[in-house]
Structures are given as structure tokens and as C-alpha cells.
Image (tube, coloured by chain):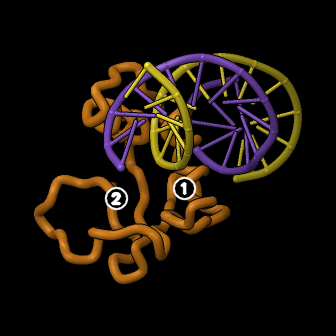
Chain colours: A orange, B yellow, C purple
Amino acid sequence: MRWENRQEGVFKFLRSEAVAQLWGQKKKNSSMTYEKLSRAMRYYYKREILERVDGRRLVYKFGKNSSGWREEEAAGSRN
DNA sequence: CTCCTATTTCCTGTTT
DNA sequence: CAAACAGGAAATAGGA
């Protein structure tokens, strides 16, 4: 992924399926797909872990219930 | 083992 | 046309 706006916590997935694979690895689920990961992401809007960013494909923004993305520089990834 | 909630899986329709 | 986006439903996973 790439940061669109580090301060605001806005990022964009460059290779959606690759990200889904990584997510799958972390959850030891080799059959994860972006379609399914994105469904979980959409539930995150509900929980306000993510804020909705419309009109921009593959762009998401961390919400107030998220944490840990402000300090990590050389970290792995994750919300 | 039970409860409960987060996440996954599936699906169908819309939008980009 | 190929990906994303959208949610409802139902099934699971895993932690308390």
C-alpha cells in the first residue's frame, strides 16, 4: 500500500489481491480474496475503525477507533 | 463447554 | 469488459 495522506491516515492499495494474500497469511487463510477482505473493511466503517472515502477506488482512511498507524515507520503493515 | 462478536463466505446488483 | 463497491444473510473462528 501507499500513503495518500500520512497525517490523515489515508492510504491506497496498489495491488488489491496481493494485499488480500498478505491478510490471508496473517490469518492463515490461503483463500482470502480482495472481495472478502473488502467486505470486512466495509464492516469496519460501521465500527468506525475506518472512514469512508468515496469516489476513489482502493482508497481507505483510518477512523477514530483505529490505532497504531501514526507512529510506525518501518513496521510491517496492518491496522 | 457456552456466549458473543469479529471475520469470512456467498450472493446479487450497481458503479466505476 | 474487468474490477470495485454495497450490503444482507448465514456460517465460522476464536477469545472471554
Which residue was labeled with disc 2?
Answer: A79
Q: Is residue A73 left or right of residue B1?
A: left
Q: Residue at x 25, y 54 (%)?
A: A77
Q: Look at label 2 and name its amino acid.
A: Asn
Which x, y percent locates residue A51? 56, 68
Q: Earlier in the sequence, mark 1 or mark 2?
A: 1
Which x, y percent locates residue A8? 42, 80
Q: Look at label 1 and name its amino acid.
A: Tyr
Q: Residue at x 34, y 67 (%)?
A: A3
Q: Residue at x 49, y 64 (%)?
A: A49
Q: Are marks 1 and 2 in contact (CB under 8 Å)?
A: yes
Would you place residue A71 above or below residue A15 in this image? below
Helix, strand or loop for disc 1: helix
Residues at discs 1 and 2 both on one chain: yes
Chain to which the residue tagged by mark 2 belongs: A
Q: Quadrant of residue A39?
A: top right
Which x, y percent locates residue A54? 65, 64
Would you place residue A5 above or below residue B12 in this image? below
Q: Is residue A41 left or right of residue A14?
A: right
Which residue was labeled with disc 1?
Answer: A44
Helix, strand or loop for disc 2: loop
Foreground: A70 or A4?
A70
Q: Is residue C7 left or right of residue A25?
A: right
Q: What separation in Å lies between label 1 and label 2 (alpha carbons)?
A: 11 Å
Placement of the C terminus of chain A among the 4 image quadrants: bottom left
Placement of the N terminus of chain A among the 4 image quadrants: bottom left
Which x, y percent locates residue B14? 86, 43
